Image (cartoon, coloured by chain):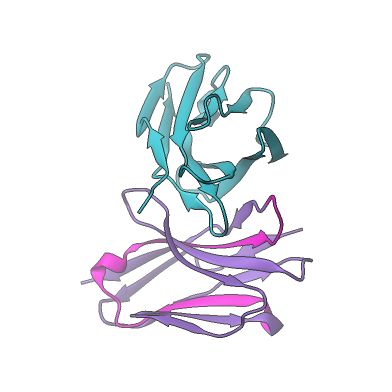
Chain colours: A purple, B cyan
Amino acid sequence: AQKVTQAQTEISVVEKEDVTLDCVYETRDTTYYLFWYKQPPSGELVFLIRRNSFDEQNEISGRYSWNFQKSTSSFNFTITASQVVDSAVYFCALSEWNRDDKIIFGKGTRLHILP
Amino acid sequence: EPEVTQTPSHQVTQMGQEVILRCVPISNHLYFYWYRQILGQKVEFLVSFYNNEISEKSEIFDDQFSVERPDGSNFTLKIRSTKLEDSAMYFCASRLDQPQHFGDGTRLSIL
C-alpha cells in the first residue's frame, strides 16, 4: 500500500530563516512519482515539483530545493531565506507510474513564517 | 496557460438535496479525477475517469456519488443525497501526460 508521512504538523520560523519540511513515503512500486503542493489560505493547490523514482538528482528552484533520497524513502523540501508569503500548508504526495495514477497525499505541514 | 475550471467556487446545499459540482478540464486532456479535502485534513482521492468510464474509485466514492462527462468538455461530480459529512472542498484534476492539473476547488457546505 502507498503511504505518505509528514511528521511535522505545524512549523513556525522567523522570516529569512531556512526551513525544511520532511516527507517519508512508502510504496511497493519500483516506479512512481513524488510531488510537493502548496495550499495557501485561499485554498487552491499550487503544484511545486514532480520527481520520478528514477531521478534522484536534487533540484533547486530559486529559494526552493528538494532532496530525494531513495535509500531512506524521503523527499524533503527546503525553503531558504523564508518569506511571509511562504506561509501555507505544504503537501507531499505520491502516485504510481501507471494509467490510473491517483495521487496519495500526506496530511500536510502548516508553515507559519513570522515577520 | 490552459487551466482546469471549477464552478461554483462555493456551493451551499441543504442536507438531503442533490448537488452537482462542475469542472471543465483542459481541452486535450484524457484522464480526469475528483479529490476531496475535509476542512483541515488531507486531500483524498475519490475517483478517476478515462475513456468514458470510471478507472478507479476509493471507499469514499459510494453509491451516493456519480461522475459524468456529458458533452466532451464538462466533467461533473454528483452527490445524490447530501449528508453533513460531505461538507468539504472538492478538487477536479485532469491530465494528458504528467502531472495532474488541479482546479481551484469548489467549497461545498451542507446545512
In screen coordinates, is B57 left or right of B30? right
In screen coordinates, is B48 left or right of A10? right
Q: Is residue B69 above or below residue A12?
A: above
Q: In this view, does A53 lie above or below B95?
A: below
Q: In this view, does A32 lie above or below A104?
A: below
In screen coordinates, is B49 left or right of B11? right
Residue A99 or residue A25, whichever sits in front:
A99
Q: Residue at x 35, y 34 (%)?
A: B9
* Start-end of magenta stretch: A72-100
Residue B55 or residue B36, whichever sits in front:
B55
- The residue sitting at the front extreme is B28
User: Is residue A76 a member of the stretch shown in magenta?
Assistant: yes
- Quadrant position of the N terminus of chain B in the picture: bottom left
Residue B12 or residue B34, whichever sits in front:
B34
Q: Where is residue A17 in the image (x, y as percent from the top left)?
A: 31, 82
Q: Residue at x 56, y 29 (%)?
A: B69
**Quarter occupied by residue A7:** bottom right
**Quarter occupied by residue B22:** top left
